[in-house]
């Protein structure tokens, strides 16, 4: 059986490329002949707020460059047809299209349409990370409905997304899985103490906010909460790590006005894979004060290092947090809710076996159920 994955792959950076890496690894290990069709151009530079779309890391999770064909230009229809021709040539039994942003609807919808119309034996499955965009663009619903209608089935990464899909496609089979546990960054080069020394942290407690900074992630609320946290737990550092996709001065001003500058370390850059470990090893908890979300690679990274989390009850993120065992779920990111949860995790870090609880909880999560899913899809 031949399976073709369509989605961003290395050297593109970020969550989608990591999803492709874990997906390709899992599907190949099941025993399917697997290849990936990736993008030559993902975002036109005018639409990309970061410094670069490419990953310059030396550590490449599950490297499989020989199985990746870079064909798709998101704004060039000729490459969409070329992608269809490649699928036809490969005689793929199943294509798995990674869907996370309706902006790619025209490209992916055209590819899916051509496969559906001309390759009757090839089945189409959309792996849905986000149903609509975090920004909630006006065209989201249109491209969702007009692209995903070609699906023979869906795989979604949370029950929250499952419910969204069912509204528009109640008769299409939907299978649930979760993101994989991202333990590929734990190289065991650091202990907690050596990580803190490497980062120049001298406080007893460390709160980590990790990942690209975007409005929906609620860093503004975390800064408000952290100011009050210091009043009760002064021996604490706030570690903010990730490239800012908005005006960094906004947050620098908030940090200054709240008087927490001497207890805040801010690293405004994308962190290469091989450099991620010390930030999580130093952390006592990962703060995720999101306004919205569907699922989260940051949560899976935290679990990959056995670090507890405090998350808001948004989207499907809270589905994977076991209260008072792997972290705490709070109603929203307002200070009166988020602050006590942070205090609780820090005050119980030596009495609640968070690390052991996470190790037990994550067993069986991730793409391990894909074998059964694909056996159904290909029958």
Image: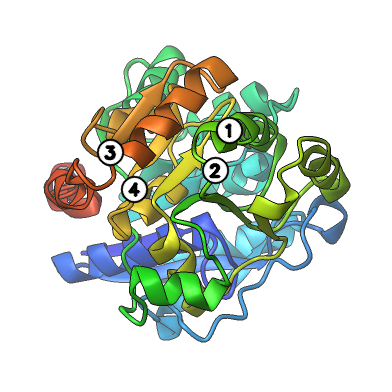
Q: Which residue is mark 2?
A: 234
Discs 2/3, front: 2
Q: Which residue is mark 1?
A: 231
Q: Which residue is mark 3?
A: 348
Q: Which residue is mark 4?
A: 179
Q: How is the image coloured?
A: rainbow
Q: CA distance from mark 3 to mark 4?
A: 28 Å
Q: Nearer the viewer, residue 291 or 106?
A: 291
For the C terminus, the quadrant is: top left
Counting from the top left corner in percent of width and height, residue 273 is at 50, 74
Relative vertical location of residue 246 with respect to residue 187 in this rendering, above or below: above
Q: CA distance from mark 1 to mark 3?
A: 18 Å
Q: CA distance from mark 2 to mark 4?
A: 35 Å
Q: CA distance from mark 1 to mark 4?
A: 37 Å
Give the structural element (helix, strand or loop) at label 1.
Answer: helix
In the rendered structure, which disc, 2 or 3, sits on the residue that comes first in sequence?
2
Discs 1/3, front: 1
Crowd class of label 3 (few under 14; some 14 to 19; many from 20; radius 10 Å): few
Image point (16%, 43%), residue name: 361
In the rendered structure, which disc, 3 or 4, sits on the residue that comes first in sequence?
4
In the rendered structure, which disc, 1 or 4, sits on the residue that comes first in sequence?
4
Counting from the top left corner in percent of width and height, residue 140 is at 66, 27
For the N terminus, the quadrant is: bottom left
Discs 2/4, front: 2
Q: Is residue 153 shown to the viewer in this render?
A: no
Q: Is residue 44 shown to the viewer in this render?
A: yes
Give the structural element (helix, strand or loop) at label 4.
Answer: loop
* Contact, mark 2 vs mark 1 (Cβ under 8 Å): yes
* Contact, mark 1 vs mark 4 (Cβ under 8 Å): no
Counting from the top left corner in percent of width and height, residue 314 is at 47, 23
């Amino acid at each position: 059986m031949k399976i073709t994955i369509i989605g961003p792959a290395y050297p593109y950076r970020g969550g989608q490329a990591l999803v492709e890496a874990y997906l390709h690894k899992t599907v190949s290990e099941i025993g399917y002949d697997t290849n990936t069709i990736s993008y030559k151009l993902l975002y036109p530079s005018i639409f990309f707020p970061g410094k670069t779309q490419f990953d310059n890391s030396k550590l490449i999770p599950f490297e499989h460059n020989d199985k990746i064909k870079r064909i798709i230009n998101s704004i060039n229809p000729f490459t969409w047809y070329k992608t269809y021709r490649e699928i036809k040539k490969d005689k793929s039994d199943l294509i798995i299209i990674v869907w996370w942003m309706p902006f790619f609807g025209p490209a992916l919808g055209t590819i899916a349409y051509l496969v559906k119309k001309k390759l009757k034996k090839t089945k189409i499955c959309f792996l849905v990370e986000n149903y609509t965009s975090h920004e909630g663009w006006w065209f989201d619903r249109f491209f969702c409905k007009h692209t995903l209608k070609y699906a023979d089935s869906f795989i979604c990464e949370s029950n929250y997304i499952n419910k969204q899909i069912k509204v528009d496609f109640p008769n299409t089979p939907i299978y649930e899985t979760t993101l994989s546990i991202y333990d590929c960054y734990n190289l065991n080069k650091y202990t907690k103490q050596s990580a803190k020394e490497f980062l120049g942290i001298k406080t007893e407690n460390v709160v980590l906010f990790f990942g690209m900074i975007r409005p929906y992630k609620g860093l503004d609320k975390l800064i408000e909460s952290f100011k009050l946290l210091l009043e009760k737990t002064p021996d604490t550092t706030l570690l903010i790590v990730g490239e800012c996709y908005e005006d960094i001065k906004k947050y620098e001003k908030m940090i200054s006005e709240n008087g927490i500058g001497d207890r805040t370390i801010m690293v405004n850059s994308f962190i290469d894979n091989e450099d991620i470990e010390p930030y999580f090893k130093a952390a006592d908890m990962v703060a995720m004060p999101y306004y919205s979300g569907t699922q989260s690679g940051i949560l899976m990274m935290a679990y990959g290092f056995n670090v507890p989390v405090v998350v808001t009850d948004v989207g499907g993120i809270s589905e994977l947090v076991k209260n008072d065992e792997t972290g705490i779920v709070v109603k929203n990111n307002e200070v009166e809710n988020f602050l006590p949860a942070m205090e609780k995790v820090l005050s119980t870090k030596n009495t609640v076996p968070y690390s052991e609880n996470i190790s037990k909880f994550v067993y069986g999560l991730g793409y391990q159920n894909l074998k059964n899913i694909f056996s159904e899809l290909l029958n």
